[in-house]
């Protein structure tokens, strides 16, 4: 409650979901290979959002790749499966990544 009031007072209420999902991405080790605005080992989240901006099936497809991994879309380095991410968290992460335009 105090955090919500503080964010509202600072005009940052809309930043709360983004911060929460950045925290989720950090807790699930996504940030070891990705960053929001720059390529590390994998593409930036903004690059992913741009690539799939017109793809209606992107949220489900990305959620699946978060859990199962993948290769070949962004180069030779494969994305390993992340078995510590639940389906619900994968969907949250995919939606957040796609919102990082």
Image (spheres, helix red, strand yellow):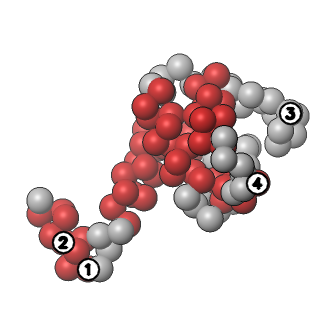
Q: Which structural element holds mark 4?
A: helix
Please name whichever residue, 101 or 6, is drawn nearer the observer in this view of the structure.
101
Which of the marked residues, 4 or 1, is nearer the chain's N terminus?
1
What is the distance, in whole Å, between disc 1 and disc 2 at their CAs? 6 Å
The answer to whether residue 3 is above or below residue 10 is: above
Q: Residue at x 11, y 63 (%)?
A: 2
Callouts 3 and 1 close, C-beta under 8 Å:
no
Which of the marked residues, 4 or 2, is nearer the chain's N terminus?
2
Q: Picture coordinates of residue 82 (x, y %)?
A: 57, 25
Q: Residue at x 51, y 51 (%)?
A: 96
Callouts 2 and 3 close, C-beta under 8 Å:
no
The answer to whether residue 83 is above or below residue 59 is: above
**In front of the other: label 4 or label 3?**
4
The disc at residue 72 is: 3
Q: Picture coordinates of residue 46 (x, y %)?
A: 66, 59
The answer to whether residue 16 is above or below residue 31 is: below
Q: Picture coordinates of residue 42 (x, y %)?
A: 73, 44
- Compared across the picture, whether 88 is left or right of 47 comes to left
Callouts 1 and 2 close, C-beta under 8 Å:
yes
Please name whichever residue, 73 or 28, is drawn nearer the observer in this view of the structure.
73
The residue that mark 4 highlights is: 51
């Amino acid at each position: 409650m105090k955090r919500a009031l503080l964010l509202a007072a600072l005009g940052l209420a809309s930043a709360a979901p983004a911060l929460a999902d950045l925290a989720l991405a950090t807790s699930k080790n996504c940030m070891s290979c990705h960053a929001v605005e720059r390529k590390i080992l994998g593409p930036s989240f903004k690059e992913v959002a741009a690539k799939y901006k017109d793809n209606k099936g992107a949220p489900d497809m990305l959620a699946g790749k978060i859990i199962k991994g993948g290769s070949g879309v962004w180069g030779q380095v494969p994305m390993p499966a992340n078995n510590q991410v639940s389906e619900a968290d994968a969907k949250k992460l995919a939606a957040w990544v796609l919102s990082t335009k």
